[in-house]
Structures are given as C-alpha cells and as structure tokens.
C-alpha cells in the first residue's frame, strides 16, 4: 500500500513539474481577437522548452491586405542590445576582449574627451547600464554626450553606451561592426535572416511595417548604418534560436555566464546584458529584455532553471498590452513577471 502511495505521489509531482515547464500559448483565435483589440496587425511568437526551440508562429498582416508569412522580418528595437552584448561576452569567453579594460584604449568619443571620467569607462559599465550616459545624447539638456555620474556608481539605461562599445570593438578588431557580430554570433548560430540595416539582401516583401495605436502604418525608414542598440531586423525563428543558445550557454565560459546572471548594479536590476528578476516562485529566475520604438514592441523572456523561454514581436504601438495579455495566459509566472517589470 505504501509503495502504491509513493508511486501516486511521484506521478502527481511529475505531472505538476511538467505543467510548470509548459509554455501554453493561447489558441490562434484568441490571439487574433487580442490583436484586433489592441490594433496590432502582426504578431510573432517563439517558444523554448527544454532548452530547445519548440515552435514559432506568425499571425496577421505585414500591412493592410498583405498576410504575414512565417519568416516575416520584424524590426525589434532594443532587442538589438542583447545581440551586441552576447557577442561581446563570447569575445570575453574566448579571451579576445576584457570586461574591465578601459574603453579609451580603443575609442574615445570626442564629446567626452575632456572629461577624465572617460578613462574609467569599461565594457562592464556599458552592458550593465552604469556608464553615466542618458539613453541618447540628444535627450540630454546639453544636447551632447555627457557623464551624469561616475561610471559604475549608478544605474541609467543607455543606448549611447552600446554605441560607444561598438566603436571600441571596431577599432580593436578592424572590422565593420556587422562583420564582428556576424563572425562571432550570427553565422555560427545560423541566424542568416538577421541584419542590422537595410542592405541589398533585404526582402522588403517580408517586412512587418510598424503601425500606430490606431492601426495605421508608419513611414518605413530604411536605415543604412548599423546600430549596436536599436533597429535590428530579424525573424522570430532566428531570434528564438538566439534565446535557446543563451540558455544553453553557447560559446560562453562558465565565468562569463555566471557574471551575466549576477546583479552588477546597486539597484539589483541588471546583470551583464540582461535585466534580472530573481526570487520568483518555485525558486525560478528570469533574464529578460524588451524593445520599444514607434510602432514596435518586443520582448524576450528566458527562464534558466526550467530551460524555458518566450519571444514576442509586434508591429503596433499598443503591442506591449498585447504582450502582457499573452504572457499572463502562457506562463505560470507570467503575472509575476509582468508585476516585476513595472
């Protein structure tokens, strides 16, 4: 009798654990209803389970009357940053780059050359958002790149920091930025449908046009220079594969991965390259990043303990409301993650 009871408890615990691991994406009919509610024309979702890409899907329209194919290309805003940051951590893992070497050894922005604080700025400061820079220099009251505080002493989200790092990498490796990322991340990971700007290989017929809150299309801006912080164009298949490779520590040393998931700042917000949510139920933790540009909302959420993940792209200004609705329905930790992200 005791043996039967033990078997029942074991089976029930296994069932509960299996449910805990599941990423339960709503039915297409539900997703389409939510898309209509939030006026988001196109939606892409990628799911990772057991550390591997489980499935991806794309729904809706690239623009009015044009169905979105499974390999639709989305501009993913600040989801560009993890691509730059993970490339950098791979370089660190290979001994080709030093997290704590001052960046002035390779690059100094002319606008901060007279400020001695530039000599203390490191890659660690950049990818944990402790540079002292605002998000973009034109947002600063001076209109210039300016240190608001000593690097490493406070936390302030900054795209400028990633651009600064980009210039240092270019000087060090004597290659265009997109070739550095291609060599160390995109090509080895077979992310062959990912690009930093509108090049000759771009298939305009697959591009998900950004839309405003009323569902009206925004002008398409065809950028021709790479940013390390914004404007990456990719497919849901490529970026979900990227997420699974992060979970599997692909080409990362144990030390680099350990530091990546360790809080680097006094606010306990950022590791290296990712925002961290720790102490969730079931002792789970999250590494995450989101993106927002006009007409674009995106997110990646990775759960290392249970080896799960979800990637969501939208081409609408109200896309984050749609994303939250999907997360709440898809993950057992969805509501907790949404609350932490406020």
Image (cartoon, rainbow, N blue to C red):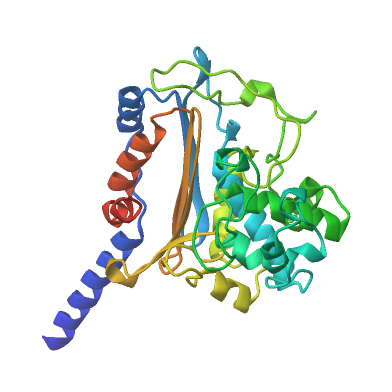
Instruction: Answer with the quarter of the image where residue 78 lies.
Output: top right
The answer to whether any part of residue 46 appears in the image is no
Residue 11 located left or right of residue 209: left
Instruction: Answer with the quarter of the image where residue 128 lies.
Output: bottom right
Instruction: Give how far across and how far down residue 12 sits, in percent.
Output: 21, 70
Q: In the image as oriented, which residue stretches furthest toward the bottom?
A: 2
> Is 305 rendered above or below residue 3?
above
Instruction: Answer with the quarter of the image where residue 66 lies.
Output: top right
**Residue at 59%, 43% in the rendered image:** 136
**Residue at 41%, 25% in the rendered image:** 40
The answer to whether any part of residue 266 appears in the image is yes
Q: Which of 252 and 197 lies nearest the eye of the viewer?
A: 197
Q: In the image as oriented, which residue stretches furthest toward the left?
A: 1
Instruction: Give how far across and how far down residue 126 sits, in percent.
Output: 62, 60
> Is 145 rendered above or below residue 104?
above
**Residue at 76%, 58% in the rendered image:** 184
Q: The N terminus is located in which quarter?
A: bottom left
Residue 334 located left or right of residue 219: left
Q: Which of 309 and 125 lies nearest the eye of the viewer?
A: 125
> Is 223 rendered above or below residue 256?
above
Q: Which of 159 and 298 lies nearest the eye of the viewer?
A: 159
Q: Count up the numbered dots.
A: 0
Instruction: Give how far across and how far down residue 244 sits, in percent.
Output: 55, 57
Q: In the image as oriented, which residue stretches furthest toward the top?
A: 65
Q: Which of 210 and 130 lies nearest the eye of the viewer?
A: 130
Instruction: Give how far across and how far down residue 202 sits, in percent.
Output: 73, 29
């Amino acid at each position: 009798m005791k043996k039967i009871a033990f078997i029942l408890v074991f089976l029930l615990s296994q069932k509960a654990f299996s449910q805990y691991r599941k990423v339960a994406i709503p039915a297409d009919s539900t997703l389409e209803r939510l898309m209509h509610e939030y006026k988001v024309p196109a939606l892409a979702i990628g799911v990772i389970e057991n550390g591997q890409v489980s499935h991806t899907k794309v729904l809706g329209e690239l623009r009015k009357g044009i169905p979105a194919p499974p390999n639709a290309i989305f501009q993913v805003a600040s989801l560009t940053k993890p691509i730059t940051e993970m490339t950098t951590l791979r370089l660190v893992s290979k001994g080709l780059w030093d997290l704590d070497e001052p960046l002035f050894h390779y690059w100094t922005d002319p606008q901060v050359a007279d400020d001695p604080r530039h000599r203390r700025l490191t890659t660690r400061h950049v990818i944990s958002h402790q540079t002292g820079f605002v998000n973009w220099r034109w947002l600063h009251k001076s209109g210039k790149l300016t240190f608001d505080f000593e690097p490493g002493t406070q936390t302030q989200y900054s795209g400028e920091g990633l651009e600064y790092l980009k210039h240092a990498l270019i000087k060090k490796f004597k290659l265009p930025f997109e070739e550095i990322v291609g060599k160390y991340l995109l090509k080895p990971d077979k992310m062959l449908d990912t690009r930093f700007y509108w090049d000759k290989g771009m298939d305009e017929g697959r591009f998900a046009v950004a839309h405003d809150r009323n569902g009206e299309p925004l002008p398409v801006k065809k950028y021709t220079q790479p940013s390390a912080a914004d404007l990456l164009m990719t497919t849901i298949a490529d970026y979900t594969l990227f997420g699974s490779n992060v979970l599997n520590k692909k080409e990362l040393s144990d030390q680099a991965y350990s530091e990546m998931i360790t809080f680097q700042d006094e606010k306990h917000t950022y590791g290296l390259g990712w925002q961290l949510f720790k102490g969730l139920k079931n002792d789970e933790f999250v590494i995450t990043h989101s993106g927002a540009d006009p007409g674009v909302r995106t997110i990646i959420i990775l759960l290392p303990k249970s080896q799960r993940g979800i990637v969501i792209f939208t081409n609408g200004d109200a896309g984050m409301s749609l994303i939250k609705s999907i997360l709440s329905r898809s993950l057992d930790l969805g509501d907790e993650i949404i609350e932490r992200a406020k």
